[in-house]
């Protein structure tokens, strides 16, 4: 490809991304409105929209302005042709979520197990089975799967290898490569990212605080991790190892952590650590135990509320380290923490304010996530759309 052709392709992709981005934020809207907002000339917008119509990524709709006059032809996103799949691996089980390119949910499933003692081989086999079922469901709706993204707890490098997931007992598991091989679908790209990083992406795009430029989401369902939006952009770091606050050592002589050290935040305040400290939670299934924990907390069981207050204090100290460095506007408690927020937030907030150097915790507030069950897989469906948002359109 010549330099001139490559430059033209890059410009075309940039313009496509601008048009799609405006439609995602502002649809329904007219071609003229897109041109005015993006700064592109009308001929360029008309050409790009024609391409998007041909590929069934947008469609036309007619709406009457102010109930008078001839209906105007407006453009909206079209979700009838394509979808992405988001998957999550956690101590509570496996979750699958599918969304079309207009943002509508087409499937949502959760299955318990295989359990943290199953090992990566059995877990990847179960994940592949869930992914195959999701692919079949999307295809039966007449849509094509553009990509699959998996959220995993712990350190995930840019090749999709889970370098360390202490809460699962995983080290150096090539999840992306093994899931791709197990699916046998080279036409469907598979990517893997950290669960908290995907969770905060969902909050930033779709939650009540969407667009907040400095936002953190902290989850603790398996380990304790933080997804970070800094100055409006996801923070990824040099190798992708961002937000691993679970391995801040708060008590050097504290309980043993899955990483091999003692006194990590994860060993003190993750949901598995909290569950392990409370008696009589019934069945050993972590999801059922969490449901029982929430019921007992809401009934003000003193044994439960005391454990949650202590865990909240540890969590607040961990969050304070992030707040001192990043000065976010909001820290959201995600996953199971969100279900327990009423009992965690007071202790988290007190410890945060005691441990931050800036007055009033630098203006930071702590709140519950709006997506306690789906933040990671929802963010994963958005992550799988990244090539599209960069103007890389699917082939006809």
Image: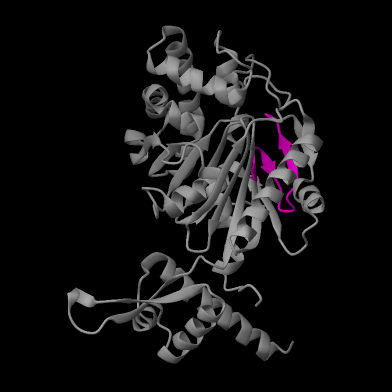
**Pick the front one: 241 or 114:** 114
Give the residues in magenta.
Answer: 151-167
* Image location of residue 263, percent across then percent down: 62, 20
Residue 32 in view (yes/no): yes
As drawn, 193 above or below 52: above
Q: In the orientation shown, which residue stands out farthest toward the front?
A: 140
- Left or right, 330 with reference to 275: left
Which residue is pictured at 76% across the width and 34% down the height? Answer: 170
Question: Residue 154 in magenta?
Answer: yes
* Image location of residue 249, percent across then percent down: 61, 25
As drawn, 354 above or below 201: above
* Image location of residue 331, percent across then percent down: 43, 39
Q: Where's the N terminus, which quadrant?
A: bottom right
**Pick the front one: 396 or 269:** 396
**Pick the front one: 383 or 362:** 383
Residue 240 in view (yes/no): no
Question: Residue 17 in magenta?
Answer: no
Which residue is pictured at 43% across the width and 66% down the height? Answer: 24
As drawn, 326 above or below 260: below
* Image location of residue 391, percent across then percent down: 57, 73
């Amino acid at each position: 490809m010549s330099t001139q052709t490559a430059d033209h392709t890059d410009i075309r992709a940039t313009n496509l991304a601008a048009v799609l981005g405006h439609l995602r934020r502002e649809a329904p809207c007219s071609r003229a409105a897109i041109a005015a907002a993006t700064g592109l000339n009308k001929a360029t917008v008309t050409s790009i929209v024609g391409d998007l119509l041909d590929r069934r990524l947008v469609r036309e709709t007619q709406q009457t302005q102010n109930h008078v006059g001839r209906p105007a032809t407006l453009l909206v996103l079209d979700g009838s042709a394509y979808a992405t799949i988001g998957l999550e691996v956690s101590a509570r089980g496996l979750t699958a979520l599918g969304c079309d390119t207009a943002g509508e949910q087409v499937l949502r499933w959760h299955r318990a197990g295989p359990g943290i003692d199953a090992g990566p081989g059995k877990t990847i086999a179960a994940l592949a089975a869930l992914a195959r079922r999701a692919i079949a469901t999307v295809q039966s709706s007449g849509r094509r799967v553009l990509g699959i993204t998996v959220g995993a707890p712990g350190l995930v490098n840019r090749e999709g290898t889970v370098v360390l997931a202490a809460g699962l007992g995983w080290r150096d598991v090539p999840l992306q490569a093994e899931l791709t091989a197990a699916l046998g679908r080279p036409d469907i790209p598979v990517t893997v990212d950290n669960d908290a990083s995907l969770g905060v992406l969902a909050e930033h795009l779709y939650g009540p605080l969407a667009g907040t430029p400095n936002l953190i989401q902290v989850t603790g369902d398996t380990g304790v991790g933080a997804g970070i939006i800094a100055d409006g952009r996801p923070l990824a770091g040099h190798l992708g190892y961002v937000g691993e606050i679970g391995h801040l050592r708060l008590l050097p002589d504290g309980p043993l952590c899955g990483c091999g050290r003692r006194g990590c935040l994860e060993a003190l305040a993750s949901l598995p650590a909290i569950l392990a400290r409370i008696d009589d939670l019934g069945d050993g299934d972590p999801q059922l135990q969490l449901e029982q924990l929430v019921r007992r907390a809401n009934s003000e069981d003193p044994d439960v509320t005391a454990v949650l207050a202590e865990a909240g204090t540890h969590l607040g100290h961990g969050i304070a380290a992030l707040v001192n460095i990043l000065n976010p506007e909001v820290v959201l408690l995600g996953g199971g923490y969100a279900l327990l927020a009423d009992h965690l937030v007071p202790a988290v907030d007190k410890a945060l304010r005691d441990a931050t150097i800036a007055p009033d915790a630098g203006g930071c507030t702590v709140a519950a996530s709006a997506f306690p069950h789906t933040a990671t897989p929802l963010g994963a469906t958005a992550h799988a759309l990244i090539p599209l948002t960069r103007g890389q359109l699917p082939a006809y």
